[in-house]
Image: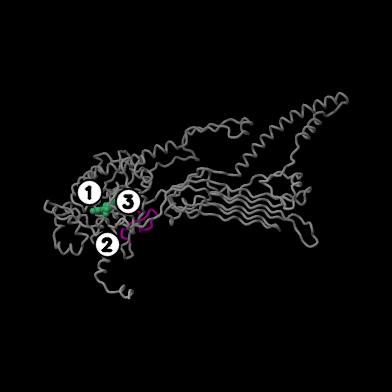
Amino acid sequence: MRYQAKYVWNPGRMLANARNMPPICSPLQGTLTPFLYPLFFSSAARTGSRTLFNTLHKRDESTTASVPASAEQSEQPEPTFEEGSHLNPPPTDYSRTIFSDKATVKLYAGGGGHGCISFLREKYISAGPANGGDGGTGGNVYIQATRGETSLHKLARRRNIKAGRGKNGQGRTRNGERGDDVIIQVPVGTVIREVERMDPVFEAEQKQKLEDALQLEASKEAIKEASIEVSKEASNEASDEDSKEPDKVVSNEVSKKTSKKGPWKWNRDKWLLYPAVTPEDIATAEFPSLPKARRSPLASSQAIAPISLDLSRPMERPILLTAGAVGGMGNPHFVTKEVPRPKYATRGDEGMQVVLELELKLLADVGFVGLPNAGKSTLLRAMSKSRARVGNWAFTTLQPNIGTVVLDDNRGRPEEQSRLPNGEPRTNYTIADIPGLVQDAHLDRGLGVSFLRHVERARVLAFVIDLSAGNAVQALQALWKEVGEYERMKIQEEQDNSPPMVQWSPFQTVQDAIRNQPETIIMNTGPSFEAPLKPAIPSIAGKPWFVVATKADLPDTKENFAELRAYLEKVGKGEVEHPSGQKRVWEQAVSAVPVSAINGHGTKQITTLVVNLLEHGDV
Ligand SMILES: Nc1nc2c(ncn2[C@@H]2O[C@H](COP(=O)(O)OP(=O)(O)OP(=O)(O)O)[C@@H](O)[C@H]2O)c(=O)[nH]1
Ligand SMILES: [Mg+2]
């Protein structure tokens, strides 16, 4: 019975459902600017069979009714928007994207597998030769920027990324397998900076150098003492019998006294022993000198330390960040005439560890900049299929939203005839909607500076101004002030972080000091082959920009818009100072587009403008 009731024909409910569906693009979309502000264009726009038109196009009714052209029109009732639609959703209707634009991860390159201690055993060969295989090399860690990724949240949660350890060597000279590699996939626009590095091979090399230097010193001392001693003895002997070659005798004796190497003792961290070896054997056994620390051949193609990468393009091949450590040596490596069956092999090296800081700078074509509650997210919903959260309070948006506007006329043809820099037709463009900026956002107030850096990379800036929230020109100037201040701070920061003009490299090791090598002082005089002159970073004020005057459907917004448009005309002509207060700015005419995002009106014009700016705005 219940099921039957579910499928009862209910035209009333279907109608209600149809109302809740997202509005289909109006055929008048994009041409509605004269509709929103008829006096700017023609007074005839408001004539015609209005009653019928309003009944058929309910969305247009609010637009026209809400812009009072005269006192009698202002008496009309306040517009009501269809609640629960795609453009005026309840605050609970949004899709939460888990997003993170920062992550700190620790990479562990794979350690090497251990060498094997094994001997051939066959019929009639009870004590065969050594045949232990070498350990496998550890896995490498790579990084690749791909289009599919949009956030760093997975990495931020993972924190530790470990490549596989190499497998141990085995008998019959079978070498261990390589460890598994790890490829970290990050979104395009990720900037990577190294924080810390622990390289066991580098440390071993440094230790070796220090030991060599100390040994050299000690042997010099020993030579001095020995030569004094021997020459005394020689002079005593010479008095007894006449020696023909006293110098040769002295040098032979000295070399006998100083050239004594070893015996090398067991080092638990480096050597592996045959299971049957007893502690007594270890105590008495002499080991060969440890092989030098080795790097995997791949280490030469590692990203240069300290790692600093800006992955602003999708990559076909990943970059190697840390190469895995080499495996230990099997016992055949230590066969000598004296020790034909060595019962030891070396352990695999530990892998390198690197701590990286990753930061995602969104690479959107258009960046929305606006005060809180200006209507940015609603505009994004109106232009794309985004389901960004919308609410009538400040800071509804807490994390950036990215929307894609598809340039398609729904008949398989591109809506705008535009081409990408590589000549391919442009099929879409992306918009970044960031949390609203408040006064002193550059000093980290509100949601602060952390989101302003996303604006930095957008190719075109769209300033979203709420026409119903006070003077639009002042709002625009306040926004530009924050953006300008942020840019100034960034330039200062870059100057502080740039390399100093003079590089002074004092003694790095004891060995340098012992050898009394001179300290080097390098003067940075200008661009060189190694450090070429960097191209000037395009400033934020130098980007193409325009203004989206939103909530144009609300009453008493027309004068505000007229004032804004007049101001922008003056800015375009250079009659008034650029609102950022900077000198090197984008010098073309600045457009202002009135829209009613909640009704989906006027958004088409934004697309035309954006496509034009992307193509001809020199960005
Ligand atoms: N009348 C009218 N209201 C609008 C329009 N656009 C947005 N709103 C309303 O303005 C309020 C704020 O909209 P949001 O899109 O959340 O504003 P926002 O700029 O994203 O706000 P934050 O994320 O807090 O910075 C919502 O209640 C919207 O319904 C419009 O064109 N006309
Ligand atoms: Mg928002």
**How far across and down, in percent of the image, does residue 172 sit?**
71, 58
Q: Disc 2 or disc 3, which is closer to the eye?
A: 3
Residue 432 lies in the magenta-colored region: yes
- The residue under label 3 is which amino acid type? Thr
CA distance for labels 2 and 3? 23 Å
Can you say whether 546 is above or below 28 in the image? Answer: above
Viewer-proximal residue, 301 or 181?
181
Q: Which residue is mark 1?
A: 468
Judge: label 1 CB < 8 Å from ligand 1: yes
Decide: marks 1, 3 in contact (CB < 8 A)? Answer: no
Q: Which residue is mark 3?
A: 396
Task: Name the image quarter holding the N terminus.
Answer: bottom left
For image coordinates 79% across by 56% down, the residue present is 127
- The residue under label 2 is which amino acid type? Pro
Q: Quadrant of residue 584?
A: top left
- The residue under label 1 is which amino acid type? Ser
Dot 3 falls on a residue whose secondary structure is loop
CA distance for labels 1 and 3? 18 Å
**How far across and down, in percent of the image, does residue 226 sit?**
77, 29
Decide: marks 2, 1 in contact (CB < 8 A)? Answer: no
Q: Which residues are magenta?
A: 414-434
